[in-house]
Amino acid sequence: MDELLMSPVDLHCHSTASDGLLTPTELVNLAAAQGVRLLALTDHDDVDGLAEARVAAKEAGIWLIDGVEISVTWNKRGIHIVGLRVDPTCPELVRGLESIRAGRMGRARKMAESLEEVGISGSLEGAHRYAENERMIGRAHFARFLVETGHAKNVKAVFKKFLVGGKPGYVPHQWADMAEAIGWIKASGGIAVLAHPGRYDIGSTNMLALITEFKAAGGSAIEVVSGSHTGEQHQEFADYAREFGLLASVGSDYHGPGENYLELGRLAILPPGCQPVWREWAEAKSAELLT
Ligand code: AMP
Ligand code: MN
Ligand code: MN
Ligand code: MN
């Protein structure tokens, strides 16, 4: 892609503090090398990587936003809410994240039992070897184990045969309530962003209901440009953002080399007419970002 059409902003990515493959330092250094100037680290349900990322960002000369990606259950479906500019020390946020992490270990045990039923043993131990932050054990760690043991050719292929509704290894789980998650983000001074809406596959009626409820609960922005959106979806969610008066965010959802639709620093810029979520941030002004 033309360098001028690539975004110097990436407000969604993962480190080893959740299910990414790179440490916060490695991730920040890679982002800087790829031309990202404003980066948010948004690990799932945990803010443990932020302190290290901050040191690395200072060294690398890029601007870091404190973020988190919270797992939510909405109408029996898993959806994700990104918090940007959160205060990782805010007791309400810290307690909330703790409460949703607490169920992960039991869920992992049940996932392993379900895989055992189709003859796949050792997955709990196998997944744990990939989970540097063991309290954050999740499906991506199981997916890596399933690739390692030859049950799928890569992580994306795993999610076609395993770990999703109706397939071996899937365990329904109750995450945070959407309003609750947005409440924690806001209590810590942050901004709530609806993550990768194009991934939910819920049809337009449900999408309207989701965005309406998200906004009513205090959500401010949606990811218009996402590593998992098509070009058409960039326009579709730019239209939703305009219609609902929401700010627009840009995030790769990068998890590490070889596990993504695109590499870090290779995101498209926002379609015309979007209000960037970073438009009034001091960090964006310092990074000399225009839009
Ligand atoms: P969990 O929080 O344990 O439910 O795991 C969710 C994570 O699994 C996501 O953040 C991704 O890292 C990974 N994941 C889910 N679906 C897919 C998919 N279709 N392709 C690749 N990774 C996926
Ligand atoms: Mn993930
Ligand atoms: Mn997500
Ligand atoms: Mn993510």
Image (cartoon, rainbow, N blue to C red):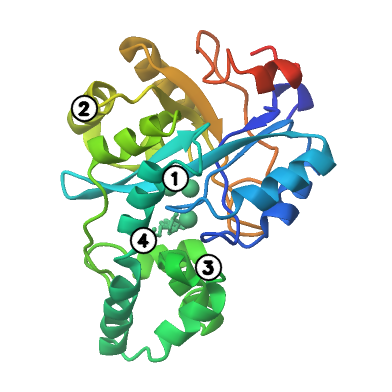
Label 3 vs 4, first from the N-terminus = 4
| Left or right, residue 167 beside residue 159 | left
What amino acid does circle 1 point to? Glu
Foreground: disc 3 or disc 2: 3
* Crowdedness near tag 1: few (<14), some (14–19) or many (≥20) residues, C-alpha within 10 Å: many
Q: How far apart are marks 1 and 4 (CA)?
A: 12 Å
Q: In which quarter of the image is residue 198?
A: top left
Which numbered dot is residue 133?
A: 3
Residue 148 shown left or right of residue 31 in the figure: left
Q: Residue 268's image quarter?
A: top right
Residue denoted by label 1: 69
Residue 286, percent from left and from top: 75, 19
Q: Are marks 3 and 2 in contact (CB under 8 Å)?
A: no
Q: Is residue 47 visible?
A: yes
In terms of secondary structure, where does tag 1 sit? Answer: strand
How far apart in space, not on screen, are marks 2 and 4 (Cα)? 24 Å
